Amino acid sequence: MPVHDSFLVFCSYSDPPGGHYRATSSLMHLSSFARPALFNPALPKSAETKYISKDDYNTLVRLIHGRRSVRHYTNRPIEIDKLNIIVDAINWSPTSCNRQPAKVFIATEPELVKQCAKTCAGATCFSGDGAYFISFCADMRVYNLPEEFLLPNLDIGLGIQNCLLLAYALGLSMTLLSWAQHTHEEDKNLRTILDIPAYYRIVVNALIGYPTHLGESPARKTLASTAVYVKNSKWKKENS
């Protein structure tokens, strides 16, 4: 099937205000990101610069497959230059209408990191004093609410993947700490510790540091169990 005739539908379940789960989906034209001419040696030099090389592609795949969520860190402090590179990566992810809503609050002092971690129920079984705490937030002032209630999480989530991969590329490990089931008291405490204004939504938090080791990758779903190529849908039959 030609790329320009292909679409992807990404589906998920979300919890909007009111506590009732609902299915959400997004439709994306493959031509918006697929590059059928990628690695084509016949491309003119001016066009080749727009695409990544095969070596770059292989490196990216290794980063995606090799990244791990590690809970045991060394006591080695993180260089600020590296931390800035990782955080800046969130500014290069796609966001709805190019809103760029990300605000990242960072705690580097060991005692402050411990106090922040206490607000996250998932921050258990961590070791090492070299980790930093990061809170990824979205500026809610740029959204039309309640219609766009889900968009901040999507916008920030796309950027966090950039940060995760760059952290791994720089020899660090970033582990996300779910904020989905936080209490009002935990939200209040974290905002107080990091001076987070009320108009920023805390999307997710993380600990980052130099890992003592990298574990084996857990089992992953196969492509066959994930991708559904639709050819003879009910709609097609009814409209052919």
Image: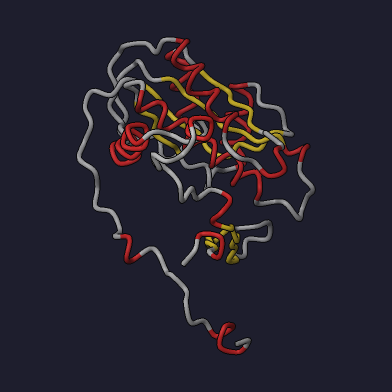
Is 110 drawn above or below residue 212 in the view shown? above
Residue 23's image quarter? bottom right
Is 5 drawn above or below residue 30 in the view shown? below
Scheme by which the image is coloured: secondary structure
Residue 20 position within the rendered picture, expressed as x and y whole percent measured from the top left:
62, 65
The C terminus sits in image quarter: bottom right
**Residue at 52% across / 61% down in the picture?**
8
* In the foreground, 116 or 148: 148
Apparent side of residue 189 relative to residue 205 in the rendered image (left or right): right
Is 97 drawn above or below residue 137 in the view shown? below
* In the foreground, 106 or 221: 221
Apparent side of residue 208 relative to residue 187 in the rendered image (left or right): left
Residue 7 position within the rendered picture, expressed as x and y whole percent measured from the top left:
55, 63
Q: Total label count?
A: 0
Is 174 drawn above or below residue 23 in the view shown? above
**Residue at 60% across / 61% down in the picture?**
27
* In the foreground, 11 or 1: 1
Residue 12 visible in rendering: no
Residue 15's image quarter? bottom right
Residue 79's image quarter? top left
Residue 143 visible in rendering: yes
**Residue at 43% across / 20% down in the picture?**
132
Residue 238 position within the rendered picture, expressed as x and y whole percent measured from the top left:
61, 89
Apparent side of residue 13 relative to residue 229 in the rendered image (left or right): right
* In the foreground, 148 or 231: 231
